[in-house]
Image: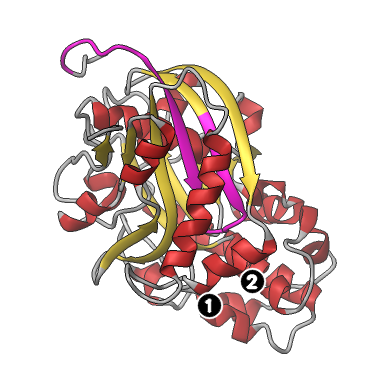
Amino acid sequence: MRKHGRERAPLWALGAMSGTSMDGVDMALLRTDGVEILEFGETGYRPYTDAERATLAAAQGRWPGEPGVAAAEAVVRAAHAELLAGAQGVDLLGFHGQTLAHEPRGRGTHQAGDGARLAEQSGLTVVWDFRSSDVALGGEGAPLAPFYHWACARRIGAGGPVAFLNLGGVGNLTWVDPRAAAPEAEGALLAFDTGPANAPIDDLLRARGGPACDEGGALAAAGRADAAVVARMLEQPHFFRIPPKSLDRNEFSFLLDAMSELTTEDACATLAACIAAAVARGTEHFPAPVERFLVAGGGRRNAHIMNVLQAELDVLVQPVEDVGLDGDMLEAQAFAYLGVRVLYGLPTSCPGTTGVAAAVGGGQISRPGE
């Protein structure tokens, strides 16, 4: 295996991730040298309250200084402070923040959360603002987990290409060849957002005064998908773009209007079918077939979505737990891993993951007292 420059000491990094589903903050410890995963550590989760989630939702699409952003920042800060209160034995924090707006071809990308302030409060070295450098250099700024997926594929001993599918608010897919010498090597990775995932289901249920999510997929399993809505979704410009490509959480919000005449059960079934159809369309871009799909994110708990995915795809679809990984914490671990890479000057994205012109290391580093 190729060495990444000089030897780098393994560190215990704590990753913090608050995703587009806006359910709460995940934190996970990881011991890594920025190349290999050496050890998994403790994890933690702090859910957002309904009021906090409403504050974050109200700030969606907003930029620094605009109404609602300061309140969203306060929510993010409070949630992270609670989780960090008992952190021990941590060398650095990889802090993602909460994405409020993402326009890589427009105004850029905006994650609520001040890493410099968090460094002062926590006493930790904080690596943050992971996406801006990539966007500034022409990349999509997302997804950023693929470099970690490469490390995961090596950790589980995959012998050939595999696909990691994350079903958070938005779906994203990583094609990984673990035989590549480094994640930025040509042919190692291809990554892109597939389309909607949990966000429209959650938003639909919230709008109708229902539960926070379709627990286990029970509602979707009791309904019937509207094929016309699925076909209309697949006509959207996103599906005709060559990856890498990324999405804003609300880019498929029109689906909620399309659900207005459907029962809740049929609407959930239709949205589940949209998720699977978007993933299946994404596989058309794979450089080579994969031996399995490994699913992370909240969507893997929706049995109906998993069943529809298995029916749409011609290979094994399984939750990442089946290979010894943690599907709830994969993205938090990813930002721990990326934080160490930033600290050591290693790339965090490349042409195959975000479309950036060349491999680039993102992120700011803030140290207490600086």
Quarter residue 264 falls in = bottom right
- Residue pointed to by mark 2: 203
Q: Position of residue 331 (x, y in %)?
A: 49, 40
- Residue pointed to by mark 1: 253
Please tell me which residue lies in front, 123 or 132: 123
Please tell me which residue lies in front, 180 or 67: 67
Q: Earlier in the sequence, mark 1 or mark 2?
A: 2
Is any atom of residue 138 visible in this view?
A: no
Q: Residue furthest bottom?
A: 261
* Quarter of the figure with the N terminus: top left
Q: Please give the name of the residue rendered at 53% of the width and 77% of the height, measured from the top-left corner.
A: 253
Q: Are marks 1 and 2 in contact (CB under 8 Å)?
A: yes
Q: Secondary structure at mark 2?
A: helix
Instruction: Please name the amino acid that badge 1 sits on.
Output: Ser
Q: CA distance from mark 1 to mark 2?
A: 9 Å
Q: Position of residue 120 (x, y in %)?
A: 36, 37
Q: Please give the name of the residue rendered at 72% of the width and 69% of the height, measured from the top-left corner.
A: 268
Q: Position of residue 222 (x, y in %)?
A: 85, 67
Q: Please give the name of the residue rendered at 65% of the width and 65% of the height, measured from the top-left corner.
A: 51
